Amino acid sequence: MTSLITPTPDIAALIAAARAVLVNAHAPYSRFAVGAAVRLTDGTIITGCNFENASYGLSLCAETVALAATNAAGRLADVAAIAVVGGAMAPDGSVGGDAIVSPCGRCRQILNEAEQMAGRPLAIYCAPPEGDAVVEHSVATLLPHAFGPADLGITPRNKS
C-alpha cells in the first residue's frame, strides 16, 4: 500500500517528532538530513537521525538509528509505525522544502526485520520537512519479496 493520506493526530505527532530530531542529523558530507520517529504500541515515540562518517560506508541512516534505539530499550517487538522526514541542508544547517523522501534499500530491509519481529504490519509515513503532505507505505510495497527472519524459521515468539 502506498497512498497520500490526511494524517490523524497520532500520525501528525509522529511526523512532528521526526521533524524535531532532523535538526540533530550529523550530515557534513552529504548535507542531507533525515529524522525518523518510531511509535510503539503503547504510544511511546523513539527517535533517531542520520549519523554520517568520513568513510561513508560506516554512516547510519535515521531509520536504523531509531530502530536500534528501540531495540536497545528492549522494545523491538512493540514497533507499530515509523515516520521518515528528510531533505537537503541549507548552509545554516536548516532543512526545508516539500520533497518527500522514502527509506533507502538498506533501511527497507531493516524495516522488514522490525515488522517480522513485531509480528504485525508496520505503517511507514513519509513526509517533507515542511508542508502537510504525508505518504503512507507498507513494508511489502517498499520491499516486495523480502527475505527476513521468517525465512530462517525465526518468529517473534522464537527469537533463537
Image (cartoon, rainbow, N blue to C red):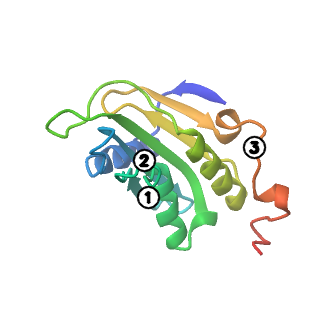
Count the marks. Answer: 3
Amino acid type of the residue tagged 1 in the rendering: Ile
Q: Quadrant of residue 140?
A: top right
Q: Secondary structure at mark 3?
A: loop
Q: Considering the image in quadrants, where does the N terminus appear?
A: top right
Q: Earlier in the sequence, mark 1 or mark 3?
A: 1
Q: Position of residue 55 (x, y in %)?
A: 40, 52
Task: Tell me: residue 69, above or below residue 128.
Answer: below
Disc 2 crowd rating (10 Å Cα; few below 14, some 14-19, many 20+) is many
Q: Position of residue 97 (x, y in %)?
A: 29, 26
Marker disc for residue 85? none
Marks 1 and 3, how far apart in space? 26 Å
Amino acid type of the residue tagged 3 in the rendering: Ala
Give the camera-side residue of 124 and 102. Answer: 102
Q: Are marks 1 and 2 in contact (CB under 8 Å)?
A: yes
Check disc 1 and report the residue beneath it. 45
Marker disc for residue 14? 2
Marks 1 and 2, how far apart in space? 7 Å
Disc 2 vs disc 3: which is toward the camera?
A: 3
Q: Secondary structure at mark 1?
A: strand
Give the camera-side residue of 9 and 76. Answer: 76
Disc 1 vs disc 3: which is toward the camera?
A: 3
Amino acid type of the residue tagged 2 in the rendering: Leu
Marker disc for residue 146? 3
Disc 1 crowd rating (10 Å Cα; few below 14, some 14-19, many 20+) is many
Q: Earlier in the sequence, mark 2 or mark 3?
A: 2
Give the camera-side residue of 159 and 157. Answer: 159
Task: Tell me: residue 142, above or below residue 21.
Answer: above
